[in-house]
Image: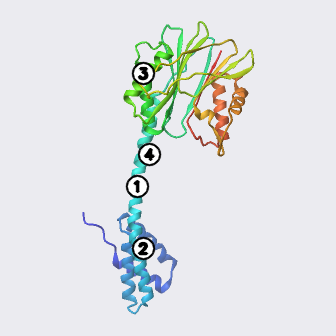
Protein backbone atom coordinates (compact mmCIF):
# COMPACT_ATOMS: atom_id res chain seq x y z
CA UNK A 1 0.00 0.00 0.00
CA UNK A 2 1.15 3.52 -0.80
CA UNK A 3 1.75 5.55 2.36
CA UNK A 4 -0.53 8.51 2.95
CA UNK A 5 0.97 11.90 2.12
CA UNK A 6 0.37 15.12 3.99
CA UNK A 7 -2.18 17.43 2.34
CA UNK A 8 0.37 20.14 1.62
CA UNK A 9 -1.99 22.65 0.03
CA UNK A 10 -4.62 22.36 2.74
CA UNK A 11 -2.02 22.84 5.46
CA UNK A 12 -0.61 25.85 3.54
CA UNK A 13 -4.04 27.49 3.35
CA UNK A 14 -4.70 26.94 7.03
CA UNK A 15 -1.32 28.36 8.05
CA UNK A 16 -1.69 31.41 5.78
CA UNK A 17 -5.19 32.07 7.07
CA UNK A 18 -4.08 31.92 10.69
CA UNK A 19 -1.04 34.16 10.12
CA UNK A 20 -3.29 36.76 8.55
CA UNK A 21 -6.24 36.62 10.96
CA UNK A 22 -5.20 34.60 14.06
CA UNK A 23 -8.77 33.32 13.99
CA UNK A 24 -9.85 30.70 16.57
CA UNK A 25 -11.89 28.85 13.95
CA UNK A 26 -8.68 28.24 11.98
CA UNK A 27 -7.11 26.63 15.05
CA UNK A 28 -10.12 24.31 15.26
CA UNK A 29 -9.64 23.38 11.59
CA UNK A 30 -5.97 22.73 12.32
CA UNK A 31 -7.02 20.41 15.15
CA UNK A 32 -9.25 18.45 12.79
CA UNK A 33 -6.41 18.35 10.27
CA UNK A 34 -4.16 16.87 12.96
CA UNK A 35 -6.69 14.15 13.81
CA UNK A 36 -6.95 13.17 10.15
CA UNK A 37 -3.15 13.10 9.83
CA UNK A 38 -2.90 10.82 12.87
CA UNK A 39 -5.45 8.43 11.38
CA UNK A 40 -3.35 8.33 8.21
CA UNK A 41 -0.16 7.72 10.24
CA UNK A 42 1.45 11.03 9.29
CA UNK A 43 4.41 11.58 11.62
CA UNK A 44 4.90 14.82 13.61
CA UNK A 45 8.25 15.48 11.94
CA UNK A 46 6.60 15.33 8.51
CA UNK A 47 4.15 18.04 9.51
CA UNK A 48 6.98 20.20 10.89
CA UNK A 49 9.03 19.69 7.72
CA UNK A 50 6.10 20.89 5.60
CA UNK A 51 5.60 23.79 8.00
CA UNK A 52 9.24 24.88 7.51
CA UNK A 53 8.94 24.66 3.71
CA UNK A 54 5.83 26.84 3.69
CA UNK A 55 7.42 29.42 6.00
CA UNK A 56 10.41 29.66 3.65
CA UNK A 57 8.05 30.28 0.74
CA UNK A 58 6.16 32.98 2.62
CA UNK A 59 9.25 34.55 4.19
CA UNK A 60 12.22 33.98 1.83
CA UNK A 61 14.29 36.41 3.93
CA UNK A 62 13.51 34.64 7.20
CA UNK A 63 16.20 35.42 9.82
CA UNK A 64 18.92 32.80 10.19
CA UNK A 65 18.10 32.34 13.89
CA UNK A 66 14.49 31.38 13.09
CA UNK A 67 15.62 29.00 10.35
CA UNK A 68 18.12 27.36 12.75
CA UNK A 69 15.47 27.01 15.47
CA UNK A 70 13.13 25.29 12.99
CA UNK A 71 15.85 22.82 12.01
CA UNK A 72 16.44 22.17 15.72
CA UNK A 73 12.70 21.54 16.22
CA UNK A 74 12.63 19.18 13.24
CA UNK A 75 15.53 17.06 14.54
CA UNK A 76 13.96 17.00 17.99
CA UNK A 77 10.65 15.77 16.60
CA UNK A 78 12.36 13.09 14.52
CA UNK A 79 13.83 11.66 17.73
CA UNK A 80 10.49 12.12 19.46
CA UNK A 81 8.68 10.28 16.65
CA UNK A 82 11.03 7.29 16.89
CA UNK A 83 10.69 7.16 20.68
CA UNK A 84 6.91 7.47 20.42
CA UNK A 85 6.72 4.60 17.93
CA UNK A 86 8.74 2.44 20.32
CA UNK A 87 6.46 3.49 23.19
CA UNK A 88 3.35 2.58 21.20
CA UNK A 89 4.82 -0.80 20.31
CA UNK A 90 5.62 -1.52 23.96
CA UNK A 91 2.17 -0.36 25.00
CA UNK A 92 0.51 -2.73 22.53
CA UNK A 93 2.63 -5.60 23.84
CA UNK A 94 1.72 -4.64 27.41
CA UNK A 95 -2.00 -4.64 26.60
CA UNK A 96 -1.60 -8.05 24.97
CA UNK A 97 0.33 -9.38 27.97
CA UNK A 98 -2.24 -8.01 30.44
CA UNK A 99 -4.97 -9.74 28.47
CA UNK A 100 -3.07 -13.04 28.63
CA UNK A 101 -2.46 -12.61 32.37
CA UNK A 102 -6.18 -11.92 32.92
CA UNK A 103 -7.02 -15.18 31.12
CA UNK A 104 -4.35 -17.04 33.10
CA UNK A 105 -5.65 -15.62 36.39
CA UNK A 106 -9.18 -16.71 35.52
CA UNK A 107 -7.94 -20.20 34.62
CA UNK A 108 -5.93 -20.38 37.84
CA UNK A 109 -8.97 -19.46 39.88
CA UNK A 110 -10.89 -22.27 38.21
CA UNK A 111 -8.08 -24.83 38.43
CA UNK A 112 -7.27 -24.16 42.07
CA UNK A 113 -10.81 -23.81 43.31
CA UNK A 114 -11.61 -25.94 46.34
CA UNK A 115 -14.74 -26.66 48.34
CA UNK A 116 -14.68 -26.13 52.07
CA UNK A 117 -16.08 -29.38 53.51
CA UNK A 118 -18.81 -29.50 56.12
CA UNK A 119 -17.49 -31.49 59.07
CA UNK A 120 -19.61 -32.40 62.05
CA UNK A 121 -18.10 -30.86 65.17
CA UNK A 122 -15.60 -28.69 63.26
CA UNK A 123 -16.11 -25.25 61.69
CA UNK A 124 -13.80 -24.42 58.78
CA UNK A 125 -13.26 -20.94 57.40
CA UNK A 126 -10.79 -20.05 54.64
CA UNK A 127 -9.78 -17.01 52.63
CA UNK A 128 -7.03 -16.68 50.02
CA UNK A 129 -6.59 -13.35 48.24
CA UNK A 130 -3.73 -12.61 45.81
CA UNK A 131 -1.81 -9.35 46.13
CA UNK A 132 -1.77 -9.19 42.33
CA UNK A 133 -3.67 -11.08 39.65
CA UNK A 134 -1.90 -14.40 40.09
CA UNK A 135 -1.98 -16.13 43.45
CA UNK A 136 1.26 -17.56 44.82
CA UNK A 137 -0.64 -19.11 47.75
CA UNK A 138 -2.69 -22.27 47.63
CA UNK A 139 -5.27 -23.98 49.83
CA UNK A 140 -7.01 -27.26 49.20
CA UNK A 141 -9.30 -29.56 51.15
CA UNK A 142 -9.30 -33.29 50.46
CA UNK A 143 -12.16 -35.58 51.41
CA UNK A 144 -11.94 -39.35 51.15
CA UNK A 145 -15.49 -40.52 50.63
CA UNK A 146 -16.43 -42.69 53.61
CA UNK A 147 -13.23 -41.83 55.46
CA UNK A 148 -13.55 -39.87 58.67
CA UNK A 149 -10.43 -37.87 57.74
CA UNK A 150 -10.23 -34.45 56.12
CA UNK A 151 -7.05 -33.41 54.31
CA UNK A 152 -6.01 -29.76 54.61
CA UNK A 153 -3.26 -28.27 52.45
CA UNK A 154 -1.85 -24.74 52.61
CA UNK A 155 1.17 -23.71 50.54
CA UNK A 156 3.17 -20.71 49.39
CA UNK A 157 5.46 -20.48 46.37
CA UNK A 158 8.71 -18.58 46.87
CA UNK A 159 8.26 -16.64 43.64
CA UNK A 160 5.21 -15.02 42.07
CA UNK A 161 3.40 -14.56 38.80
CA UNK A 162 2.61 -17.14 36.13
CA UNK A 163 5.47 -19.58 37.07
CA UNK A 164 4.13 -19.69 40.63
CA UNK A 165 0.60 -20.28 39.33
CA UNK A 166 1.81 -23.18 37.17
CA UNK A 167 3.67 -24.69 40.12
CA UNK A 168 0.54 -24.47 42.26
CA UNK A 169 -1.56 -26.15 39.57
CA UNK A 170 0.94 -29.00 39.46
CA UNK A 171 0.81 -29.35 43.26
CA UNK A 172 -2.98 -29.54 43.24
CA UNK A 173 -3.21 -32.16 40.53
CA UNK A 174 -0.40 -34.20 42.05
CA UNK A 175 -2.27 -34.18 45.35
CA UNK A 176 -5.51 -35.22 43.65
CA UNK A 177 -3.79 -37.99 41.70
CA UNK A 178 -2.28 -39.80 44.66
CA UNK A 179 -3.85 -43.29 44.92
CA UNK A 180 -4.58 -42.87 48.60
CA UNK A 181 -5.75 -39.31 49.21
CA UNK A 182 -5.92 -40.02 52.92
CA UNK A 183 -2.32 -41.15 53.44
CA UNK A 184 -0.40 -39.59 56.33
CA UNK A 185 0.81 -35.95 56.12
CA UNK A 186 4.47 -37.02 56.20
CA UNK A 187 3.96 -39.46 53.31
CA UNK A 188 2.00 -36.83 51.37
CA UNK A 189 4.75 -34.23 51.68
CA UNK A 190 7.44 -36.76 50.79
CA UNK A 191 5.55 -37.67 47.61
CA UNK A 192 4.95 -34.02 46.69
CA UNK A 193 8.59 -33.20 47.38
CA UNK A 194 9.72 -35.75 44.78
CA UNK A 195 7.28 -34.29 42.23
CA UNK A 196 8.49 -30.73 42.86
CA UNK A 197 12.17 -31.70 42.82
CA UNK A 198 11.77 -33.36 39.41
CA UNK A 199 9.50 -30.82 37.74
CA UNK A 200 10.04 -27.35 39.20
CA UNK A 201 12.98 -25.06 38.44
CA UNK A 202 15.67 -25.17 41.12
CA UNK A 203 15.28 -21.43 41.77
CA UNK A 204 11.68 -21.90 42.89
CA UNK A 205 10.76 -23.46 46.23
CA UNK A 206 7.40 -24.26 47.76
CA UNK A 207 6.56 -24.20 51.45
CA UNK A 208 3.62 -26.32 52.52
CA UNK A 209 1.79 -27.58 55.56
CA UNK A 210 -0.40 -30.62 55.11
CA UNK A 211 -2.79 -31.75 57.83
CA UNK A 212 -5.15 -34.66 58.25
CA UNK A 213 -8.03 -34.14 60.66
CA UNK A 214 -9.60 -37.26 62.16
CA UNK A 215 -13.07 -36.19 63.19
CA UNK A 216 -13.76 -39.37 65.17
CA UNK A 217 -11.01 -38.62 67.68
CA UNK A 218 -10.85 -34.83 67.08
CA UNK A 219 -7.14 -34.95 66.30
CA UNK A 220 -5.14 -33.04 63.69
CA UNK A 221 -2.06 -34.78 62.31
CA UNK A 222 0.25 -32.53 60.32
CA UNK A 223 3.68 -32.13 58.74
CA UNK A 224 5.42 -29.01 57.47
CA UNK A 225 7.76 -28.34 54.57
CA UNK A 226 9.29 -25.10 55.80
CA UNK A 227 5.89 -23.44 56.02
CA UNK A 228 4.93 -20.47 58.17
CA UNK A 229 4.04 -21.82 61.63
CA UNK A 230 0.38 -21.52 62.54
CA UNK A 231 -1.20 -21.11 65.96
CA UNK A 232 -3.25 -23.25 68.33
CA UNK A 233 -5.77 -21.61 70.63
CA UNK A 234 -6.50 -23.49 73.83
CA UNK A 235 -9.97 -22.67 75.12
CA UNK A 236 -9.08 -24.13 78.54
CA UNK A 237 -6.02 -21.90 78.94
CA UNK A 238 -7.44 -19.03 76.86
CA UNK A 239 -4.15 -18.51 75.06
CA UNK A 240 -2.49 -18.91 71.67
CA UNK A 241 0.54 -21.18 71.21
CA UNK A 242 2.68 -21.24 68.10
CA UNK A 243 2.50 -24.58 66.29
CA UNK A 244 5.99 -26.08 66.19
CA UNK A 245 6.61 -28.06 63.01
CA UNK A 246 9.92 -28.27 61.16
CA UNK A 247 10.76 -29.55 57.70
CA UNK A 248 12.69 -28.67 54.53
CA UNK A 249 10.87 -26.74 51.79
CA UNK A 250 9.66 -28.81 48.83
CA UNK A 251 12.00 -29.28 45.90
CA UNK A 252 15.42 -28.98 47.54
CA UNK A 253 16.35 -32.66 47.73
CA UNK A 254 14.53 -35.80 46.52
CA UNK A 255 15.26 -37.79 49.70
CA UNK A 256 13.62 -35.83 52.51
CA UNK A 257 11.75 -37.29 55.46
CA UNK A 258 9.12 -35.17 57.17
CA UNK A 259 8.30 -35.45 60.83
CA UNK A 260 4.64 -35.84 61.75
CA UNK A 261 2.98 -34.05 64.66
CA UNK A 262 -0.43 -34.35 66.26
CA UNK A 263 -2.74 -31.98 68.04
CA UNK A 264 -5.89 -33.08 69.89
CA UNK A 265 -8.68 -30.52 69.87
CA UNK A 266 -11.17 -29.97 72.66
CA UNK A 267 -14.41 -27.99 72.45
CA UNK A 268 -13.68 -24.32 71.87
CA UNK A 269 -10.14 -24.93 70.62
CA UNK A 270 -9.03 -23.46 67.32
CA UNK A 271 -6.17 -24.00 64.84
CA UNK A 272 -4.99 -21.08 62.71
CA UNK A 273 -3.12 -21.89 59.49
CA UNK A 274 -1.72 -19.07 57.37
CA UNK A 275 0.93 -17.85 54.95
CA UNK A 276 3.51 -15.15 55.56
CA UNK A 277 1.25 -12.63 53.84
CA UNK A 278 -0.65 -12.53 57.15
CA UNK A 279 2.23 -12.42 59.63
CA UNK A 280 4.28 -10.06 57.46
CA UNK A 281 1.60 -7.46 56.88
CA UNK A 282 3.18 -4.02 56.71
CA UNK A 283 2.13 -0.77 58.31
CA UNK A 284 4.18 1.76 56.37
CA UNK A 285 7.72 0.37 56.24
CA UNK A 286 7.35 -1.77 59.37
CA UNK A 287 6.05 -5.30 59.84
CA UNK A 288 3.12 -5.83 62.19
CA UNK A 289 4.15 -7.76 65.29
CA UNK A 290 2.85 -11.31 65.76
CA UNK A 291 1.12 -10.31 69.01
CA UNK A 292 -0.84 -7.69 67.08
CA UNK A 293 -1.91 -10.30 64.50
CA UNK A 294 -3.14 -12.59 67.29
CA UNK A 295 -5.06 -9.73 68.91
CA UNK A 296 -6.93 -9.18 65.64
CA UNK A 297 -7.67 -12.91 65.31
CA UNK A 298 -8.86 -13.03 68.93
CA UNK A 299 -11.15 -10.06 68.28
CA UNK A 300 -13.11 -11.94 65.61
CA UNK A 301 -12.73 -15.62 66.52
CA UNK A 302 -16.06 -15.71 68.38
CA UNK A 303 -17.79 -15.42 65.00
CA UNK A 304 -18.58 -18.40 62.75
CA UNK A 305 -15.32 -19.58 61.17
CA UNK A 306 -15.90 -18.22 57.65
CA UNK A 307 -17.19 -14.90 58.92
CA UNK A 308 -14.19 -14.69 61.27
CA UNK A 309 -11.51 -15.18 58.57
CA UNK A 310 -13.30 -12.71 56.29
CA UNK A 311 -13.35 -10.14 59.10
CA UNK A 312 -9.65 -10.63 59.83
CA UNK A 313 -8.83 -10.23 56.14
CA UNK A 314 -10.87 -7.02 55.85
CA UNK A 315 -9.14 -5.66 58.96
CA UNK A 316 -5.66 -6.11 57.47
CA UNK A 317 -6.81 -4.95 54.06
CA UNK A 318 -7.95 -1.65 55.58
CA UNK A 319 -4.76 -1.44 57.63
CA UNK A 320 -2.71 -1.63 54.42
CA UNK A 321 -4.96 0.90 52.68
CA UNK A 322 -6.37 -1.82 50.39
CA UNK A 323 -2.94 -2.49 48.86
CA UNK A 324 -1.80 -5.99 49.85
CA UNK A 325 1.98 -6.36 49.82
CA UNK A 326 1.78 -10.15 49.61
CA UNK A 327 -0.80 -12.87 48.99
CA UNK A 328 -3.06 -13.26 52.04
CA UNK A 329 -4.20 -16.76 53.04
CA UNK A 330 -5.84 -17.73 56.32
CA UNK A 331 -7.64 -20.87 57.57
CA UNK A 332 -9.54 -21.31 60.85
CA UNK A 333 -10.39 -24.77 62.23
CA UNK A 334 -12.75 -24.33 65.19
CA UNK A 335 -13.74 -27.31 67.33
Q: What residue is pinned by disc 2?
A: 76
Mark 4 neighbour class, 10 Å CA radius: few under 14, some 14 to 19, many 20 or more = few
User: Front-most of 103 and 249?
Assistant: 249
Left or right of 119 in this view: 177: left
- Say above or below: 323 vs 264: below
Query: Which of disc 4 and disc 3 is earlier in sequence?
Result: 4
User: Front-most of 252 and 220?
Assistant: 252
Q: Is residue 112 visible?
A: yes
The percent position of residue 221, horizontal first and vertical second, equals 56, 14
Separation of marks 3 and 4 at Cα, in angstroms: 40 Å
Q: Is residue 36 visible?
A: no
Residue drawn at x 61%, y 25% as measured from the top left: 230
Separation of marks 1 and 4 at Cα, in angstroms: 12 Å
Query: Which of disc 3 and disc 1 is earlier in sequence?
Result: 1
- Say above or below: 68 vs 153: below
Secondary structure beneath dot 1 equals: helix
Secondary structure beneath dot 4 equals: helix
Q: What residue is pinned by disc 4?
A: 98
Q: Which numbered circle lies on residue 205?
A: none
Q: What residue is pinned by disc 3?
A: 255
Q: What residue is pinned by disc 1?
A: 90
Query: Which of disc 2 and disc 3 is earlier in sequence?
Result: 2
- Quarter occupied by residue 48: bottom left
What number of labels is visible? Answer: 4
Mark 1 neighbour class, 10 Å CA radius: few under 14, some 14 to 19, many 20 or more = few
Question: Which tag is nearer the camera, tag 4 or tag 2?
Answer: 2
Amino acid sequence: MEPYKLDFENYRKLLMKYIESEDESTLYQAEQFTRTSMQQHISPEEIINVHIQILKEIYPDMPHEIDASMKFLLETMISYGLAYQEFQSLREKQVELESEIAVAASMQQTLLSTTIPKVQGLEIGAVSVPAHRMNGDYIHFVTGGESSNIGIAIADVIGKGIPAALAMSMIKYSLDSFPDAMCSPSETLESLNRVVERNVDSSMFITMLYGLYNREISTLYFSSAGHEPGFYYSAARKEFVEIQAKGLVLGVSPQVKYEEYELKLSDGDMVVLLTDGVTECRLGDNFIETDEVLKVIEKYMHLPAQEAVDSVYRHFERLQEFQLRDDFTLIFLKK
